[in-house]
Amino acid sequence: MSEDVIKVEGLTKIFNHSLKAVDHISFTVKQGEIFGFLGPNGAGKTTTINMLITILKPTEGKATILGSDIAHQSNEVRSSIGLVPQEYTADDDLTGYENILLCADLYGIPRGTSKKRAMELLQLVELTEFKDKKVQTYSGGMRRRLELACGLINRPKVLFLDEPTLGLDVQTRAATWNYIKTLKKEFGMTLFMTTHYLEEADSLCDRIAIIDHGKIVVIGTPTELKDSLGGDIITLSIQKDTDITPLIKKIVHVKEAKKDNGSYMIKSESGEVTAPLIIEALRKENHVVTRLSLTKPTLNEVYLEYTGKSMRDAADENKESGMAQRMMMRRAH
Amino acid sequence: MTQSNGNSKNKLHGIWALTNRELKKWYKAPAVFILTLIQPIIWLGLLGNALNLGSLVGGSSIQFPAELAQQFTPSQLSALQKFFDGLGPQILQGAFGTTSYISFMAVGMIAFTALFTTMFSGMSVVWDRRLGFLNKVLSTPVSRSVIILSKVFSATLRSMFQASIILLIAIPLGFKVGLAFTPLSILGVYAFLFLICVGLSSLFIAINIRSTRIETPMAVMNLLNLPLTFASSAFFPIDRMPGWLQAVANANPLSYTINGMRQLLINDTIDYSALALQYAYVGVFAAVLTTIGIVLSWRYLNK
């Protein structure tokens, strides 16, 4: 079953009549998918997520979640989604357990049900023994897990995670993702997440969209995105100073070969197969390979390819008002 | 779908949960709670004594100059002494409606505390926004007006609790109820407090609702709070103020609240038509501002 859970068509948000934070984006998220939403600061991620969770009204376009329109049926949408926000929103002065019950009350879940669910969720995120401690005594990882539990109290069909591992150490990040994967399996949810950790997005997400300057620049599975760069990169040098590019171009899998400052840059699918073939072919022509390296593209390369290498100012992530000043050229694609 | 989630369809769901959250932040944090108890003691003890206008005119402190005293016989002198001694309380009665300034002041203090409590609870909207809690709540099916109403109710409950503490503390400090006082008057006082707190906290929430920073609303509220306090009958009777100030004080809903509460608590007779007007004025103030608060919450919480 691959029903579209989130459908977005031409969604646009213009702030103050001039600032296009999100510019006619369209995409769909399928049932049970983990959908990653990546982009530089101020690219429109937060604005998009805020529209989908019904706290911002779109200026134009349409989006539905499980068939309910985010603008006109917001209460239906709100009941069927969960949110794990970027910030720690749990109340310091209340205990973990009280915080979960508070979340439950916001969904109007009857007390009997919510107590049972709260205990189950605390068990799941391994906070049971701290449930009666005030949240101010919790560590960052524990708070994150509490946010997760709160986001799941209404058994959401779609869970929105906004930078769920921001500011956590490597161990806690890995643990958090394990919880998220377990929870997803347990409840069969669809996940929509933003993150800055590209290797995490690569290993977790079924599909990824990269947004920049309010527009989706590319969308696909991590493998598709990496392949779109033209495959692996083999760099090699030879002893003699003759141009061997025509020779290399004849080899299967090789897509592109360039001479660059005495070394050769070769783009190829499955580089680990191609590299020995190249060495073999060159030896037959009496060329001696002095140096060879093989790079597999990561999501980092994909990200930089599509969003450019220039830094963005991080200050206005929430308002995304910095956008207007950022008229920097993206690398031509 | 909502049914299968076990979610309720009640429009006001979550109101107690959110109100209780605010209250818990107060009564579960011992330092904050104790401070709210100590604050009225300090105010009453300090202001009640430092500003004791009663001592200016009361007491037997009047000593006749020797040359003046020579002109009277001792019996004439003691009659005069009696006359002047009685003058103080009469002036007090005339100006404050009671001979006990601390009683006059305690009622003003109740309103003053209500003003401060509602002011600070108004600022919590800004914190909720900054900490991301507001966005979290907005993504749930809680009604937008419930978010505002819960703030209003928690501020109101806190103020009413503090008012009770002030009255209890004022008794050992010399608070005297008027002849017209009945246990029912206490209910009347709470009704006044409820209305003014609902109105004031709606006002302060409306000021704060768009802010993402705390400084601007702070400045606005500091600007509002002095005229609201001192251009009212809280510490000084209105009819002794200059004309222009009287005009301000007579429009100030705090004056109506305080005058009404004084009628119920410390006056010897109750003017029921005045009392009705006082309830009506404060009631309309509360209704108008709550409506404004809810309308603004719909506007600014649904961007």
Image: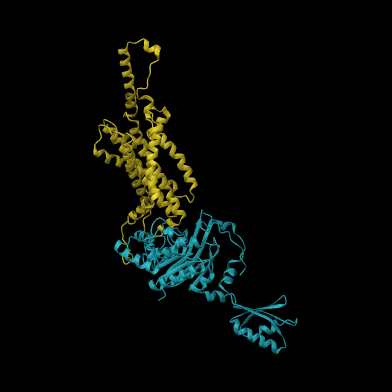
For the C terminus of chain B, the image quarter is bottom left
**Residue B112, how many percent across, how many down?**
38, 39
Residue found at x 65% / y 85%:
A278
Q: Is residue A44 visible?
A: yes
Q: Colour of chain B?
A: yellow
- The answer to which quarter of the image holds residue B188 is top left
Residue A162 is situated, as x and y percent measured from the top left of the image, at 47, 64
Q: Going by the image, does B41 lie left or right of A305?
A: left
Which of the 4 quarters of the picture holds residue B14? bottom left
Q: Is residue A278 above or below residue A154?
A: below
Q: Quadrant of the N terminus of chain B?
A: bottom left
Q: Is residue B131 depicted above or below B114 in this figure?
A: below
How has the structure been colored for display? by chain
Residue B12's place in the image compared with A24, above or below, is: above
Q: Is residue B131 left or right of residue B92?
A: right
Does the rendering let one see residue B6?
A: no
Between residue B128 and residue A210, name the one nearer to us: B128
In the rendered picture of this protein, how many numbered marks are placed on residues? Answer: 0
Apparent colour of chain A: cyan
User: Which percent across, then down, holds residue A23?
Assistant: 52, 62
Closer to the camera in the image, B118 or A309: B118
Asked whether, in this view, residue A312 is left or right of residue B146, the answer is right
Q: Is residue A327 left or right of residue B136?
A: right
Answer with the quarter of the image where residue B10 lies. Answer: bottom left
Q: Residue furthest right?
A: A241
